[in-house]
Image: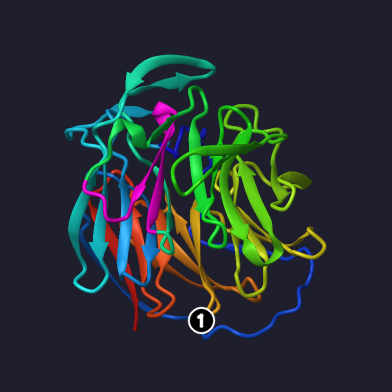
Amino acid sequence: MNLTPLGWTRAASAAAALVVSAAIAVPGTASAAPSYTVTAVPAGVSSGGELALDAGRKQLFIADNNDSLRTTGKDFIPSPDPVRPKVEVFSTVTKTPVRSIDLSNQPGGRMMFGTTEVLPVQQVPDGLAIDPKRSRVLVTNAHASGITVFSMDAKAVSPRNLIALPTSHPMGAVADPATGKFYVGLNGTNKVAIVSSGGRLVGEIPNLYKASFPDIDASRNRLYVGNADYDAKKNNFVAVIDLRTNRVIKKIATPSNSRAKVDPTTGRIWANSFDTGKISIIDPVSLRIVKTIDTKTSPSKLAIDAKRRLVYSANLQRKTITVYNADSGAILTTVPTGVAIHTIAVDQATGIVYGTQHIGKNLTILTPR
């Protein structure tokens, strides 16, 4: 899983403090503190991993990351459910799962412990990215060190869909809507893999360290990549990559295990540190941190509602989702979810937020009132 043990020993506080390091100009305003109805519905999975929304199809694609060994964030535990690797397709209209894409017919890999491959495992999906324009899905099978690419309409995959990259521990992925290329953080080999929409490895971006979760700013031809130095936690940054040359142009020092998310309206980069609870807001022009939010939580993943100027943070350990003003960084409200949320996505048309439940079978839905 992408939630590899992180040494979660920091106690979480119920309050969130805002630390401002510099002022930033804001293009607009978000509404006053919003309120939500929180519901949970079956997602068709045993353990919710990453998800992606295809707004045109009105469907969510959800990775079922039920591995033989699950991580609680503190240690590994055996899964009580049969391991059936798949991606579940969920309708945002009916709020029900509508079909499964079977990923079980792939050669297995080996789980890494430290720098050694020791345990045979199945290709279980965790990270996920979609390219709706070309109707393609990519999943990262982190523990088995594989990448699988297939059609959105597939019923099952074959061994031909697999890119095996031993010792790579692929984590997050993002699609470039202009070119159809996928970019995948390879934590084990300190690179970003470039994968074609047809499912071929077409390049790599080196000069990284413990690459984890990428996000793209297509308008600026940039890729931002966080890193996850699980052990020493001394070499921590968000890398800025020029996609015209595939070269790293800057490494911005950030708190450990920061994960970048681009605001498509302003180009600002929100980088949430899962280890420290801090969120760094980075200006796309100066490439400097202009604001730091100390959430006192465990922000796992972010989602940005560009239309309503809201940012959502899934606080996995605290079992909450925090809502921020996308322009000022102010905390607007914190919504209790009652369960640990793995990854979130927001529907730009409706403002509804969807969150997978870590080691859970349901999907949490936040509906604006």
Crowding at label 1, few (<14), some or many (≥20) Cα neighbours within 10 Å?
some
Q: Is residue 233 above or below residue 116?
A: below
Give the residues in magenta. 135-155
Residue 52 location (% of width, % of height): 39, 58
The C terminus: image quadrant: bottom left
Q: Is residue 57 above or below residue 358?
A: below
Residue 231 location (% of width, % of height): 59, 27
Q: Residue at x 69, y 59 (%)?
A: 221
- Classify mark 1: helix, strand or loop: loop
Please identify the quarter of the rendering in which residue 117 is found: top left
Question: Does residue 222 belong to the magenta stretch?
Answer: no
Residue 44 seen in the figure: no
Q: Residue at x 42, y 53 (%)?
A: 318
Residue 337 seen in the figure: yes
Q: Say how many tags the image has.
A: 1
Residue 305 location (% of width, % of height): 50, 73
Q: Amino acid at mark 1?
A: Arg
Q: Residue 200 or 104: which is nearer the viewer?
A: 200
Q: Please indicate whether residue 133 sits to the left or right of residue 65 in the image.
A: right
